[in-house]
Amino acid sequence: MPDESTPENNVDRLLTHLKPESLAARIVVAYAGAAGEGRKTAIEKIVRDRLAEIAGDYDKDP
Amino acid sequence: MIKIRNVKIQGFRAFGKVEQTLDFNSLIACVWGPNSQGKTSLAEAIEFLITGQIVRRELMSSTQDEFTDALRNVHMPKNLPVYVEVTLIGTAGPRVVRRSLTTDYGKKQDCQTVLQLDGNPATETDLTVLGIVLSQPPLRASVLAQHTLGYLFSAKPQERASYFKALLEVADLDTLRTSVAGLEQTLPFIESPLFLKLAIAAEIPAAANLKALSVKVPARAVLDKALSAAITAVMKAEGQAVSGTLAEQADALALYLAGKRTETFPVNGFDKKAFPVWSPAIGEQLASLTHFLTERGKVDQQTRQLAALFVEALTLPSVAGIADPIDCPLCAAQAALTPERVALIREHVADNASFSDSEKAATKAVQQLHDVVRAAQKQLFSALPQFMVYTSAERRQRGFRINRIYSLLGDAHAASIGVWLKELKHLVRIYKTVSRPAGQLVAELSAMQDDLEKLDDIAALADRCHEAIRLSGQFHQAMTSYLPFESTVVDALNAVIDAQSQTKGWQELIDIAKDPAGLRSGLVEAAALAQVRKDLTQALRQIDGGNEKVAEEKFTALSDGVATWWDLLRPDEPSFFSALRPRAGARRTIDFKAGLSAHEDRSNPSLRDVIAVFSQSQLHCLGLALFLARAVHEKTGFIVLDDPILSSDEGYRTHFNTAVLEKLLDDGMQVILLTQDQKTCKDVTELYLHRQIDTFQINLDSPADGTTVINKADDLAAMIDRASVLVRGGHPDLHRQCGEGLRNAAERLCKEILVKSQRAKGNKTVTISSYDHKVLGELGPMVEPLLTSDPSHPGKLRVMASNLNPAKHDDAFPAVDTLKVALGNLKMFKKTYL
C-alpha cells in the first residue's frame, strides 16, 4: 500500500523528479492545474511569464 | 473491489435455451467439466458481458469472418434471447448487469449488444462507474484463457511497448510531453524591425563594432556609444567629419546618404508629408452664418443704408424727447415726425445693431472655414510624392524617370513596379476628385470674405463642406492603400542604389541611431526569446528524464509483481523471470528479461530475453504471472482462469493450487477457476473447504439443450462428504463450518424425503425448489410422519435439528461429538429413506 507521501498520479510523480520552481516544474504544475483545452493556455502563459521575467531583468539594467 | 455474486447465461455459445445459473457465495469457485462441455464458453460469457466482444476472434482468427454467427448457440430457438447476466457486489450493494446479443458477428462486422443495469439501458461508462475494470486492449477483461496467455510474447515490440505504457497508465505523460514540445512553436517572432536593421548595419565594414550588440544586450550608454562610433567610422571612411549628439550624427549621415543616393537616382522624389485624417468641426461656423442670414432678413437694404442717419437723428434733443409731432429735422416737413414714427425709427436702429453683430460673426466664420479648407488643400498637395508635383521638365532634369526605375531594378521587380504604377494612377484619380471641389470651396469662401452678400444658401454651403470632408477621407484611404506598393519599389530602389553607391546598411544605421531606445527593446526581446528557447529545451530534457523515471518506477512495481507470482509458481528454479523493463535508449521497446544462473540460489545470473531462453512451459507461467500481476495492479476484484496450468505441467499445478490461489484469496481477489482436470478440482475443493469453496460441474449431454450447470454444493452426498472432512479438523472454525454444513444437509435431506413421498403419491411436478425458503424447524415436523422404518427415527431427527440450530450463531456451535452423531444419523437417514 502506498504511504501518505506516495504521489497519487503520474504528474505528481513526475514533479518529484523535477527541481522545484524550475521552468519544467512550473509548466507541469500549470498543466496539472488546468483541464482540457485550458492546459495549452495555462502552459503558454508560463512561457509568456518567463519571457516577461527575462525581459524585466534586462530592463533593470539602464 | 467488486465481486461477482452470480452469473446467468442463456444461449451464449455452448449454453442453450434454459438459463443456467452459477451462485458464488465464496471468494473461490471451482468449475469442473470434461473437455468440450462449455468451460471456455463460460469464461467467454463473462468476457462478453464486460467487453461486448470475445478477444479470441481478434487474436486467433486469421480472417475474422471465421467467427460469423459464433456467439449465438446454433440450436437456440430464434425467438429466445441470448444474454449473460451477473449480479455484482460492490460498494453500492448488489447491481444486476445484463448484456444481450442483438446481432451476432458477421462477415467483417462486429457483433451488436444491448447493455442493461438493473433493468435499465446502460453504457460502458456505467460499468466503469460500478467498479468493473477494463484493462488495455486487446486483453480488456480479467479473464484468462489459453489463447490469451501468449499474446504479449507474440505481439510486435512497439505494440508491446504501447500496451505496457497504457497498462501502467503513463500515456498521459506522453501527452504532457507533446504539449511541452509544442511550446516553442508558440513563441512569438521577433517583431522589432530595428533588431533586424542592426544585423544589416553591422555588415558595413566600418561599423563592424555593432556585431557585439547582438551577442549581449548592452546598457543604454554602451549602445549609444557604439552607434556613435559606427557613424563616425562610416563618415571617416568617406573623408567626412561628424560631431554632436547621436541624433545629430544620424542626421548628418542621412544628409550625406541622400546626396550619395541622388547621384544614382533621385529617390527623394518619393518624399511626401503624411496626410492626417481631416474631420474639422464646422458646426459653429455654419450656425453663425445661419444666424447672420436670419438677421439680414429682418433689416432691408434701405434701412441698413440709413441706419447711421437714424442714429444721429435720435440723438437730437427734440427727437429724443418728442411728445407731440414736430417738423422733420431732415426734410423740414411740418409736424411730420410724430412720436409713433420716432418709435418706429428706434426699432429699425435696434434691428440694425443685431444685424451688425451677426455680420461680424459671419465674417469671422467665413474666414475660419476658408482657412480650414485651404489648410487641408495644402496638406493634400503636400501628401503627394514629390515627383508628382514636378513638371515633366523638372522630372527629366532630376533624372526621375520610370524607365530608369525599371532599368535599375531589373526584371525581378517589373511586376512590383507595374502594381505600384497602377496604384499610383488610382491615387491620382482620387486626388483630382478631392482637390477640384476643395479648390472651388476655397474660391467660394474667398469670395464671401470679400462680399458677404454672396452668402445666400447655407444648406448648399454645408453640403459642399461635408462633401469635401468625405472626399478627403477617401484620399486618406487611397493613400493608406498606396503606400505599401510604393514602399516595395522604394526599398528595392534603395537597396540597388546603396549597393551601387556602396552605402548598403547606411539607412539601417541611421534608423537605429535615431531610435536607440527602440533598438535596445528589440535587443532585449531577441535575447529573451533566445533564452526562453534554451530554457524550454532544458525543461523538455528534464521532463523527459522525469517521465522515464516515473515509467521506471511503475515498471519496477509491475515487474516486482510479475516476479512475485513467478516465484510462487516456479520457486527455486535457476532460470527465472528477472525483470520487465523499457530497453535503454529505445523508449518504444519493452524487454522481458530472464535470469540464468548455474546455482540453485540464483546467484550470478546472466540476463537474456525470455523469448530466446524460456521453454514453452516457462513462457506459459510467465504469461500467467503477468496476468495475475496486472489484475492485482488494476484491482480488478475478480479473475476468471480457464485451465491456467498446462496439463503437462503437473509439477507446477501444486504450486498454483496452494501458494498462488492462497495469496490471491488473501489479497481479496475473487477467483473463478475452470478446469477439465478432475484431480485439480478435487484438490482445490479440499484445500479451500475452509473458505467454503463453491463447486460446480458442467455437462453438455445434449447439444440441443446446451451446457448445463450443477451446483455440487447442493448435492446431499457432497454436503455429507464435506462435513465428514470438516469434522475431522481440529480448528473451531472448521467445526462451525461443519455444523452449518450439517444443518444445510439436514434441510436438503428433509426436502428430498418430501419430494420422494409426493412423487410416490403421483405428484410429478414437485421438486426440491418447491420447498425453498423452508428451514429445518419447519421441515422436521413435515418429515417426521414419513420416518416409519424405526420408531426412534422421528426423535433422532428432532434432536438433530435441535442440536444443529446453534451452528448458525457465531458465539456457539455444537460439540465435536454432537456433530459426529448428527453426521452418522444423516448418513443413516439417507441410506434408509432415499
Image (cartoon, coloured by chain):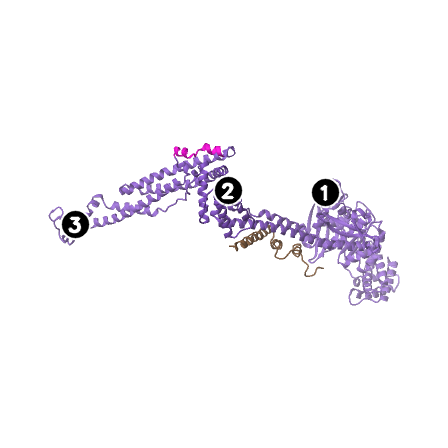
Quadrant occupied by the C terminus of chain B? bottom right
Palette colour of chain A: brown
- Which region of the structure is painted magenta? B391-408
Classify mark 3: helix, strand or loop. Answer: helix
Upstream in sequence: badge 3 or badge 2: 3
Counting from the top left corner in percent of width and height, residue B130 is at 68, 54
Q: Chain of mark 2?
A: B
Front: mark 3 or 2: 2
For disc 2, the marked residue is B505
Palette colour of chain B: purple
Q: Tags 3 and 1 in contact by the CB under 8 Å rule? A: no
User: Is residue B394 located in the magenta-colored stretch of the structure?
Assistant: yes
How crowded pointer 2 is (Cα within 10 Å; few <14, some 14-19, many 20+) is rated as many
Upstream in sequence: badge 3 or badge 1: 1
Counting from the top left corner in percent of width and height, residue B572 is at 83, 55
In this view, which residue lies farthest toward the front? B239
Counting from the top left corner in percent of width and height, residue B803 is at 82, 66
For the residue marked with disc 1, what is the amino acid?
Tyr
For disc 1, the marked residue is B105
The dot on residue B605 is none
Alpha carbon separation for disc pair 3 and 2: 84 Å
Q: Nearer the viewer, residue B22 or B552?
A: B552
Alpha carbon separation for disc pair 2 and 1: 76 Å
* Most frequent secondary structure within the magenta stretch: helix
Relative height, residue A39 to residue B396 (above, below): below
For disc 3, the marked residue is B313
Q: Nearer the viewer, residue B255 or B690?
A: B255
